[in-house]
Amino acid sequence: MTQQPVITLQSWLMVGLLGFTWGGTFLVTEIALEGLTPFWLAAGRITFAACLMTTIWAAGGFRLFEEPVTRADWTAATIIGALSSAVPFMLLAWGQQFVTSGFAGVSMAAVALIVLPLAHFLVPGERLTPRKGVGFVIGFVGVCVLIGAQAFETTGASMEPAGRAACLGAAGCYAVSSILMRRLPPVDTIGLSTVLLLIGALLVLPMALIVEGPPPLPDTKTILVVIALGLIPTAAANLLRVLVVRTAGPVFMSLTNYQVPVWSVILGALILGEPLPPSLLWAMCLILTGVGLSQYGALTRLFRGR
């Protein structure tokens, strides 16, 4: 895909909704882990979302690529399917056995840090200008403040390194899949979202069976939580993510991951009763300043009606 990113008011609304949705997902994942093992949790939410999206895709006539594609494009789609759902969902579910929802959410800010330099070299129209670079640095400082010593008191100071590495590994998967997704040829948004979830399901189901054996029998509460995870942050959010990446670009999409840490900490405080670290307000100011500076051009075009 070679056209320039197109950022509109709808783009900003979708990114804001995604940030809030994914910021609260880590809380729901912790609840689900009380009644289900990590890999089967990932398998359950991806499979449910894939079945739901397949129904919607079928109603639209199974549209996918607009033109014939090469084997390389299908290979890229398979890699994207693995890196956009199967692998990161397994890593996050496994990692959250050892880290809190707050830390898992904070780690997602690393997506923006990985995407920006990659997009500079791999995605047309996503050059790392001096202004974007300064905004990137300010946002990075805000993330550092957010996960500083005082913030770690509410997101777990004694977390196991393996859990941290799993969460950061998931962030890396999201970043690389966004870059690869943007480079695909013209494709139907619903069709691509569905195919990626189907690929993810085909990968995660055998992996869960190999690693954890037959699935445990969950209770009603866990089943409802898995359905919610499959419906909202997996199926619906995956559709929005594909739409944003394909229209506004992966760098703009990465702004979601500046919001996720803030929402994960706030929702953790409101729902789990975790105290808010004093550094949070400073971190929020820095992150929002960095986002605004890096996307200043998009903001001015938006308010001018372009």
Image: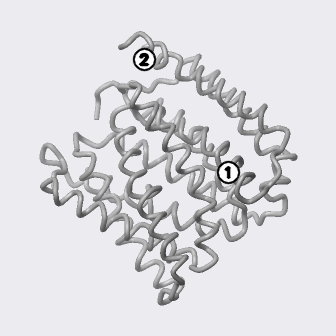
Q: Residue at x 77, y 34 (%)?
A: 281
Against 267, residue 5 (above or below) is above
Check disc 2 and report its element: helix, strand or loop: helix
Among numbered discs 2 and 1, the one appearing first in the sequence: 1
Within 10 Å of the Cα at label 2, are there few (<14), some (14-19), or many (20+) other Cα atoms?
some
Q: Give the camera-side residue of 281 and 157.
A: 281
Q: Residue 96: x and y, percent? A: 66, 66
Q: Residue at x 34, y 41 (%)?
A: 243
Q: Residue 111: x and y, percent? A: 56, 44
Q: Residue at x 43, y 38 (%)?
A: 14
Cα separation between marks 2 and 1:
30 Å
Check disc 1 and report its element: helix, strand or loop: helix
Residue type, numbered disc 1? Leu
Which one is closest to the eye, mark 2 or mark 1? 1
Residue 301 placement, left or right of 92: left
Within 10 Å of the Cα at label 1, are there few (<14), some (14-19), or many (20+) other Cα atoms?
many
Residue corresponding to mark 2: 302
For residue 267, the mark is 1
Q: Residue 289: x and y, percent? A: 66, 24
| Quarter residue 83 falls in | bottom left
The single residue placed furthest to the top in the displayed view is 304
Residue 73 placement, left or right of 38: left
Can the viewer see residue 279? yes
Residue type, numbered disc 2? Leu
Against 6, residue 82 (above or below) is below
